[in-house]
Amino acid sequence: MIKAMLTYIWPQDDPSIRNRVKVAVGLLVGAKLLNVTVPFLFKFAVDDLNSKVGVSQGEPFLSIASAPDVVISLSVAMLIGYGIARAGAAGFNELRNAVFAKVAQHSIRKIARNVFLHLHNLDLSFHLSRQTGALSKTIDRGSRGINFVLSAMVFNVVPTVFELALVSTILGLKCGGEFAALALTCVGIYTAYTLAITQWRTKFRVYMNRAENEAGNKAIDSLINYETVKYFNNEFYEAKRYDEALKKYEEASLKTSTSLALLNFGQNAIFSGAIALAMVMTAKEIAKGNMTVGDLVMVNGLLFQLSVPLGFLGSVYREVRQALIDMQTMFTLMTREPKVKNVNNAYDLIVRPEDTTIEFRNVCFQYIEGKPVFKNLSFVIPAGKNYAIVGGSGSGKSSMIRLLYRFFEPNSGEIFIGGQDIAKLDLQSLRRAIAVVPQDTVLFHDTLFYNLHYGDFTRDEKDVYIASKMADLHDTVSTWPKGYNTQVGERGLKLSGGEKQRVAIARAILKDSPILVFDEATSSLDSITEQNILGTLRKATDGRTSISIAHRLSTVMDADEILVIENGSLLERGSHAELLSKRNSLYSRMWDIQHSTTGDFSEDNLIKEKKTKQA
């Protein structure tokens, strides 16, 4: 992960980002050098003042009496320099943060964009099993983790090591090897303690994240299913489930907080002990005449300044570990290869209106091992023809469309469009050639116009309105206060089922693809609107290859041919009239059940109808 991040903060194709990194590192070195000079300036000022103090009748007095002389004295100049050095070091740090901010945010944006695009490129099987709430939190925490790790590695870990080496060297040269050894020993014990405690308490943070994911997922899942919750009066049940997840988060959070208190106390105790020992050692040297009072101030200042980045280093290590855990989940998503992807040397689908023949050749497919959906399924849909696919629930009608659109790959067999094997085609070119009206229409939380225009953003506004009229939607929208600027709500919940289906039909018309697929395109429409839409669909499919999946057989009566699927195989095929003429056919039995005109609701007739349905 670190290697991957370095490619973002040192990109080969963007010299401006690299230059910003160089400037930030330069400012960092300057800040550390200024930091180290601060205790020295204070030492010299104290020693200078101390040297000007005499003793007169047991009372201290300044040997320099006049105010102007004091102002221009060396000690005052050094004290002013002390203040300037402190302000300069802080200024360099802030300027460094400002310069590096663009690098960090640019990296986060690129990584987040790549993750987002990768998620869209993953196959449908991943998205069918995902949990939206947990996935959203994974990306959010992972992005924040990237920002923290980048800043920590560049501005905390490396600079602290540099400052430790600098301080230890200065103490060794100025005060003796025992002072350098004390500084290194203190840092060693401090680091070992921090690593051990942090390692122990990391598991609490993992539990806390897991509980937070669970709580977030339950909340989002429940809110998405708001209507279902209301239908079954389960508000208190959902609140209880959410509270149970929050309780787990609370318990893990408390353990995290208490263990953090232990870590902070131990760190302070270790460093306070080291500073106290250093002060005692310096006091002894002063008593021997080997050091001055200024040296005492300098040692204290150097060690105290070292404590500041080390204090951050403890929290940085803790947060870096957590950030890496958060990032690992996100980067794991990046390493997941889509099951459906372009083969090497994939080529674009060559679309010829006169040859958009669709062929399934010995296709076998299953979602779950041992539970086949298709067994050697073979059929041909000629170019420009309107074919219908009917069958019972679970017979595989929608699965055929998923295979055609390459949401899934068949376990064996081949699918052709215009004689071209779709497994060898570029996915984008294949999917551009197919417009689908899905059974369950989900809309974006935006305006109605945006959702209609989504079918093809290259088309102008006039084309959107034409498609809306063809889908029998325009007259209804014209009566709304905000018209096409009406917000449809999350997943289109503000629209009726019929309105959502008409939006889906309008989008498919706007896409203007040579192959049209209608998966229960009129199941949510009333009879009058359904007849209007069927007329529209006849116009839209004129000259195009189209597939209509239906439960209501009356909507596919005019299909050129009807394919009847049963148990993963093609059971029957023919026109509406041909299939009805076979009185023992599955199609004719389905038709009789759906269009019984006896009007006899007697007990005997109901029993007879029940037996017919069971058959």
Image (cartoon, grey):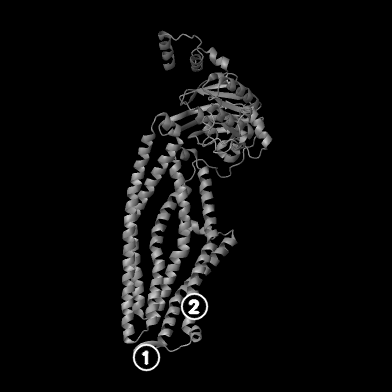
Q: CA distance from mark 1 to mark 2?
A: 29 Å
Q: Return the mark for residue 80.
A: 2
- The spot of residue 597 in percent (x, y) is 51, 10
Question: Does residue 273 appear left or right of residue 62 in this picture?
Answer: left
The residue labelled by disc 1 is: 56
Amino acid bearing label 2? Ile
Residue at 44% from the left image edge and 34% from the top image edge: 226
Q: Earlier in the sequence, mark 1 or mark 2?
A: 1
Report crowding for label 2: few under 14, some 14 to 19, many 20 or more residues within 10 A (C-alpha).
some
**In front: label 1 or label 2:** 1
Residue at the bottom extreme of this rendering = 57
Q: Quadrant of residue 372?
A: top left
Q: How many marks?
A: 2
Q: In the figure, 165 relative to 490: above or below?
A: below
- The spot of residue 176 in percent (x, y) is 36, 81
- The spot of residue 543 in percent (x, y) is 66, 27
Residue at 47% from the left image edge and 64% from the top image edge: 155
Can you say which quadrant of the picture contains the C terminus? top left
Amino acid bearing label 1? Ser
- The spot of residue 515 in percent (x, y) is 61, 31
